[in-house]
Image (cartoon, grey):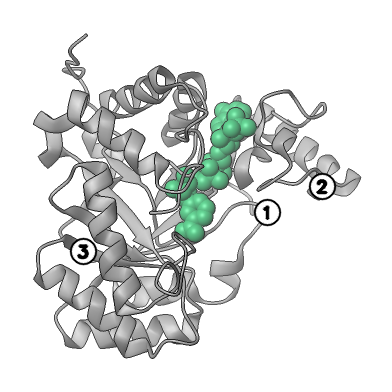
Amino acid sequence: ENYTPSATRYEASELFYNRCGRSGVMLPKVSLGLWHNFGQANDIDTCRSILRYAFDNGIVHFDLANNYGPPKGYAEQTFGKIFESDFKPFRDEMFIATKAGYEMWEGPYGNWGSRKHIISSLDQSLSRMKLDYVDLFYSHRYDPNTPIEETLNALVDIVKQGKALYIGISRWPLEQLKQAYNYLAERDVKVLTVQDRLNLLDRKPQNEGILSFCREVGAGFVSFSPLAQGLLTNKYLNGVPAHSRMEQNLFLQKKVLTPELLAYLKYLNSLALDRQESLAEMALAWVLAQRGVTSVIIGASSVEQLAQNIKCVNAAPFVEEL
Ligand code: NDP
């Protein structure tokens, strides 16, 4: 049936949106990522329900990449189908991101950071998603074998051509991130967001100075895998359930769940229960409480997960270091 978004979707707006660094853009504290759960094997009605639930609750920022699926490209295609049927009238309310830089198609141009790869990949993404432009386009990773200027000039041109409104940088080492930031800024393209993994189990962006660099220059920081792919939920506290990411043993491997990690997760879970929150809520609230973080990009395989996770914006403050 036709989709009519909830009339109250922006009711809590003041609480729900953070300014993205020193920019004009506000992003929801919770954003939705489509890395998993939007592939060929996933039920399109569930995909549609997740996207509708997100939008109905003010989650207007959607994070994709050329290669999300499986198979590669499929998440963008699923998104495009649902965009056409449900979201087209609301395009200007949405902030849609995609990326290029990981292996996407065969041959020498299907991967990494050449101008050839980046421009062709974005054109493909736009056609799969049925969009004229994306709001945010990322270099998905640093390419050590392509001159940095070649990758960055492609990003500048993408903005000048109107195919993306803003540029983001994902997973670049700090040194190259600084170079990229400055090179783009000199050409009037400001890096809007830096995207990296930050969660209770992985604090690399803090330890390596990426987050403090973002604060210094006024770039936003968005954290991917804020739940460590589900480890920071109650999902694996009592074994590996069927239909879980770890059961597939591919991107989240069973061997990471050592007895030591399990003990730590149970300890964190007890802290969350003391706060009358789920572990997921507390873990997301922790990421959002780190100085300089704009948004957490979560994944969800059901509407129930999304409903639980979004509650993190009302979580208790942290009185002690975790
Ligand atoms: P999360 O850490 O949020 O993990 C999501 C998974 O955790 C879900 O699929 C689900 O697993 C489980 N989960 C979530 N909520 C609950 C809950 N309440 N109870 C129980 N289990 C729950 O994020 P992702 O690893 O999925 O990454 C999020 C997004 O970040 C991606 O979609 C992508 O957009 C982006 N990303 C970017 C990368 C980059 O290189 N720039 C790299 C990785 C991700 P299950 O499916 O088993 O139910």
The residue positioned farthest toward the right in the image shown:
259
At label 1, counting other C-alpha atoms closer than 10 Å, the crowd grade (few under 14, some 14-19, many 20 or more) is some
Q: What percent of the width, then of the height, locates residue 79?
A: 31, 36
Q: What percent of the width, then of the height, locates residue 184?
A: 24, 82
The amino acid type found where label 3 is placed reads Tyr
Q: Which residue is mark 1?
A: 201
The dot on residue 245 is: none
The amino acid type found where label 2 is placed reads Leu
Q: Which residue is mark 3?
A: 166
Residue contact between numbered discs 1 and 2, judged by CB atoms under 8 Å: yes
Residue contact between numbered discs 2 and 3, judged by CB atoms under 8 Å: no
Closer to the N terminus: mark 2 or mark 3? 3
Q: Is residue 149 above or below residue 267?
A: below
- Quick one: SS at disc 1? loop
Residue at x-position 82% and y-position 47%:
261
Q: Does residue 287 appear anywhere in the picture?
A: yes
Q: Which residue is mark 2?
A: 261
The amino acid type found where label 1 is placed reads Leu
Alpha carbon distance from label 1 to label 2? 9 Å
Alpha carbon distance from label 3 to label 1? 30 Å
**Relative to 60, 319 lies left or right:** right
Q: What percent of the width, then of the height, locates residue 262?
A: 83, 41
The quarter holding residue 242 reads: top right
- Quick one: SS at disc 2? helix
- Quick one: SS at disc 3? strand
Closer to the N terminus: mark 3 or mark 1? 3
The quarter holding residue 165 reads: bottom left
Alpha carbon distance from label 2 to label 3? 38 Å
